[in-house]
C-alpha cells in the first residue's frame, strides 16, 4: 500500500518533468537565498562584534572637581594634571580596584597624565604614565603594542625609557635611540607609536613610576601613584555593556567624570537596522515562496481534475487523493530545500564573498547546521501549505460532475 | 449463475438537475431490483437517463430522493469516503467514453483499480497480466491511451472494471464506440467473466445488439421503467 502510494507520487512528478523542475527550482532559489542571507547576517554580526570590541568597549575616568596640589614651577593653567585636554584633579588609586571589580568591567588600570612646559623652548607636551603590566585597559584607551611604528613597546621591566607619539616625534625631530631630557631626567627613546584617536593619548609615554618621578619635580607636595592618580583607564567586557559600566562607575563617586567616544552607539544602531532589513527580506521570500508554490500546485491540480475525477470514480478515496497531492508538494519542497542548501554551501565555499564584503577579518562565513535544519523544516511547511489548499479543493469535487465536464 | 438473493435495490429513486435555475427531472421515482448473478440491460433512447442511473448506482452522485441499497449498504447513509470504499471493493465501472488516465500506461490504468487495497506488486501483476492477455493487449502494456485504437481503449476500460473481481459491474454503453466485431468480442469477454465470477452486470444501452445476451431488459422512459 505504501509502495502504491509512493509509486504514484514519483510517477506524477516524473511524468510532469517541466512542471516539477520549475517547482523545485523555486524552492532552490528561495532556500539558497535565505540560507545565504542568514549566513551573511551571522558573519556580519561576528565581524561587527570584532569591530565593536575595538570601537566602543573603553572609557576613562577622571575628576575635574577635587582640589589638587599646585604645580611648583609654572602656573596650573600651563602645567598640571590633564585629562581630555582639561585640567583634572587627583583621585584615589583605590578607585582602580573598585572599578576593576565591577561586573561589566574587564580591566582597569591607573594612569598619570601631566602637561609639562619645556624649559628650553617653552613648548607644551603631555606625558602619559601607564602600567605596562596591564595591557588590556591601556591598549584601547592609550596605546597598544600594535601601534608601534618603529622600535619596541615598553615592558614592565623597562625604566627610564619612553615611547614618543609619532606626530610629536616628527615635530621634534626625534627618533628611536635618541635621548630625551624631561624635567632634568634623561630618557632613552625606545619606540615610536601611532595610537590614533584615544581618550588618554599623550605625546610621551612612560612607565607610571617614571612619570611619578618627574611629575613630583613639578609639585610642591609629591604624590605616590599607589595612592593618587588622575585617570583610570577602563576596558569593558562588551560594547553592549558600556552604558551599564559607566553608570556603575559614577556610583563609586558622583564627582567622577567619564569620557567615552561612544562610537559604538551609531555602529550598533546601523547594524540593528541592517539586521531588521535582512529579516524583512527573508520574511518576504518565505511568503513569496508559499504563495508561488500554492499557486503552482493549484494550477497543476486543476490540470489534473479529470484524472482525479476518474480515480475517485474507480474507488480512490478523498484521503488517497489529498495524501497524493500533499506528498507531491512536500517531496518537491524537500528536494528543492536540500538542493538549495547544497547550492548555498557551494556558493559560500567557492565564491570569495568575504573578499567582496571588504572586511579584513579572520572570521569565516559558516553555514549553521541548525539553520539548515530550520530552513528544511520551513521548506516542508511551505510544501504542506502549498499542497493543502489544492488538495482540499479537489477532494470536495463531485466525481460525476467532473467526468461530465470533461 | 443467478440466485434469488437481491443484490441491488432502488426504491422511488428520483434525480433532477438544476440547469440555469430550472429544475430538470431525469428519474421520476424509479424502482428496481437486481438479483445476484443477473445481467440486466437498461435500454432507452438518448437522454432517457441511463448514464445518470449508472452514476447513481455507482455512488458517483447522490439521488435527489429515494433509496439505493447494495448488499445492505444504504447509499444515502454512507459518506463519500464510504461510497468510494464501496466502489473500490464491490463495483466495477465501464464508462461510455472509457475515461482512461491519459498519462498512465495500459498496465497502470488497470492497476489503478487495484491500488490502495493492500495487494503486493506480485499479487497485482498476477491479476492484471492474465486479464490483459485474454483481452489481446499482451503487446500493449506500456502504451499510453493515445497510442491505442478505440477498440483497445475499450478493452483496457473493461480490464480495469474486471480486475478487482467486483460483485457488480456497471457498463455504460460498452459497445457504442467500437466496431461490431470488437463490440462482440468485448461483450463476450465481459459476459464470460461475469458468469464465471458469479458477478452481476447492469448494461446501459440504446441499441439492440446487446439485448440478447442479457437475462432481463428494462426500458427506461420518462424517468421510470416501463
Image (cartoon, helix red, strand yellow):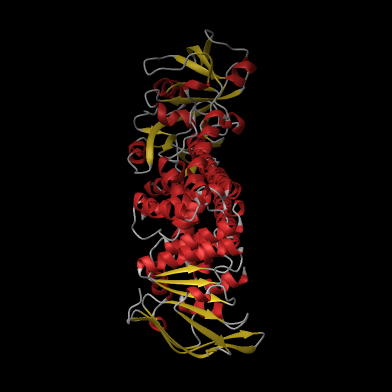
Does residue A78 appear in this view? no
Name the image quarter holding residue A320.
bottom left
Name the residue at 39% across, 29% down. A223
- Image quarter (top left, top right, bottom left or bottom right) of the C terminus of chain A: bottom right
Q: Nearer the viewer, residue B120 or A96?
A: B120
Residue extending farthest top: A177
Name the residue at 39% across, 79% down. B78
Q: Image height check: is B130 above or below B201?
A: above
Name the image quarter holding residue A5.
bottom left
Q: Nearer the viewer, residue B57 or A239?
A: B57
Q: Position of residue A290 (x, y in %)?
A: 55, 57
Q: Is residue B62 left or right of residue A93?
A: right
Residue extending farthest right: B20
Q: Position of residue B26 (x, y in %)?
A: 57, 86
Q: Image height check: is A380 above or below B165?
A: above
Q: Nearer the viewer, residue B170 or A252?
A: B170
Numbered marks: total = 0
Q: Image height check: is B77 above or below B166?
A: below
- Image quarter (top left, top right, bottom left or bottom right) of the N terminus of chain A: bottom left
Does residue B148 appear in this view? yes
Q: Image height check: is B59 above or below B141?
A: below
Q: Position of residue A28 (x, y in %)?
A: 55, 44
Q: Position of residue A130 (x, y in %)?
A: 43, 26
Name the image quarter holding residue A33.
top right
Amino acid at each position: 500500500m505504501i509502495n502504491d502510494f509512493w509509486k504514484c507520487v514519483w510517477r506524477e512528478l516524473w511524468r510532469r518533468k517541466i512542471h516539477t523542475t520549475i517547482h523545485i527550482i523555486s524552492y532552490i532559489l528561495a532556500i539558497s537565498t535565505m540560507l545565504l542571507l542568514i549566513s551573511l547576517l551571522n558573519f556580519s554580526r561576528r565581524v561587527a562584534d570584532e569591530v565593536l570590541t575595538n570601537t566602543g568597549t573603553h572609557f576613562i575616568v577622571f575628576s575635574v572637581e577635587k582640589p589638587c596640589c599646585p604645580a611648583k614651577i609654572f602656573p596650573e593653567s600651563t602645567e598640571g594634571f590633564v585629562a581630555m585636554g582639561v585640567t583634572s584633579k587627583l583621585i584615589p588609586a583605590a578607585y582602580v580596584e573598585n572599578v576593576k571589580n565591577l561586573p561589566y568591567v574587564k580591566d582597569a588600570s591607573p594612569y598619570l597624565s601631566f602637561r609639562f612646559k619645556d624649559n628650553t623652548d617653552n613648548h607644551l607636551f603631555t606625558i602619559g604614565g601607564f602600567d605596562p603590566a596591564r595591557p588590556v585597559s591601556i591598549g584601547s584607551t592609550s596605546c597598544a603594542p600594535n601601534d608601534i611604528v618603529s622600535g619596541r613597546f615598553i615592558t614592565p621591566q623597562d625604566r627610564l625609557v619612553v615611547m614618543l607619539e609619532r606626530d610629536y616625534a616628527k615635530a621634534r625631530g626625534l627618533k628611536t635611540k635618541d635621548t630625551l631630557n624631561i624635567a632634568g631626567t634623561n630618557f632613552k627613546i625606545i619606540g615610536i607609536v601611532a595610537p590614533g584617536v584615544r581618550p588618554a593619548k599623550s605625546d610621551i609615554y612612560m612607565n607610571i613610576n617614571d612619570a611619578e618621578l618627574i611629575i613630583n619635580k613639578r609639585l610642591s607636595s609629591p604624590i605616590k601613584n599607589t595612592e593618587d592618580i588622575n585617570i583610570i583607564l577602563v576596558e569593558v567586557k562588551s560594547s553592549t555593556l558600556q552604558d551599564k559600566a559607566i553608570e556603575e562607575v559614577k556610583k563609586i563617586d558622583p564627582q567622577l567624570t567619564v569620557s567615552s567616544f561612544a562610537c559604538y552607539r551609531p555602529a550598533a544602531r546601523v547594524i540593528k537596522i541592517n539586521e531588521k532589513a535582512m529579516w524583512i527580506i527573508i520574511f518576504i521570500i518565505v511568503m513569496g515562496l508559499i504563495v508561488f508554490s500554492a499557486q503552482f500546485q493549484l494550477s497543476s491540480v486543476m490540470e489534473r481534475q479529470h484524472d482525479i475525477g476518474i480515480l475517485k470514480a474507480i474507488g480512490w478515496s478523498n484521503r488517497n487523493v489529498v495524501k497524493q497531492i500533499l506528498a507531491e508538494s512536500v517531496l518537491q519542497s524537500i528536494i528543492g530545500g536540500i538542493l538549495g542548501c547544497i547550492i548555498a554551501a557551494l556558493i559560500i565555499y567557492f565564491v570569495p564573498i568575504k573578499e567582496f564584503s571588504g572586511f579584513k577579518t579572520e572570521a569565516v562565513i559558516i553555514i549553521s547546521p541548525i539553520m539548515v535544519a530550520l530552513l528544511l523544516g520551513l521548506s516542508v511547511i511551505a510544501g504542506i501549505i502549498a499542497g493543502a489548499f489544492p488538495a482540499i479543493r479537489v477532494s470536495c469535487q463531485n466525481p460525476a460532475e467532473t467526468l461530465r465536464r470533461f | 449463475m443467478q440466485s434469488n438473493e437481491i443484490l441491488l435495490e432502488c426504491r422511488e429513486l428520483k434525480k433532477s438537475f438544476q440547469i440555469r435555475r430550472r429544475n430538470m427531472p431525469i428519474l421520476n421515482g424509479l424502482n428496481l431490483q437486481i438479483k445476484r448473478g443477473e445481467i440486466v440491460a437498461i435500454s432507452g433512447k438518448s437522454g432517457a437517463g441511463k448514464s445518470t442511473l449508472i452514476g447513481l448506482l455507482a455512488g458517483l452522485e447522490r439521488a435527489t430522493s429515494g433509496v439505493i441499497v447494495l448488499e445492505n449498504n444504504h447509499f444515502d447513509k454512507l459518506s463519500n469516503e464510504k461510497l468510494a470504499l464501496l466502489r473500490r471493493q464491490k463495483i466495477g465501472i465501464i464508462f461510455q467514453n472509457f475515461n482512461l488516465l491519459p498519462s498512465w500506461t495500459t498496465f497502470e490504468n488497470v492497476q489503478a483499480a487495484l491500488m490502495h487495497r493492500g495487494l503486493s506488486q506480485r499479487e497485482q501483476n498476477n491479476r492484471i497480466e492474465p486479464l490483459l492477455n485474454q483481452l489481446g493487449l499482451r503487446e500493449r502494456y506500456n502504451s499510453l491511451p493515445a497510442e491505442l485504437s478505440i477498440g483497445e481503449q475499450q478493452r483496457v476500460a473493461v480490464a480495469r472494471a474486471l480486475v478487482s473481481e467486483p460483485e457488480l459491474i456497471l457498463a455504460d454503453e460498452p459497445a457504442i464506440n467500437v466496431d461490431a466485431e470488437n463490440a462482440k468480442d468485448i461483450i463476450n469477454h465481459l459476459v464470460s467473466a461475469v458468469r464465471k465470477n458469479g458477478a452481476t452486470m447492469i448494461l446501459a444501452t440504446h441499441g439492440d445488439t446487446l439485448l440478447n445476451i442479457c437475462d432481463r431488459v428494462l426500458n427506461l422512459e420518462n424517468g421510470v421503467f416501463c
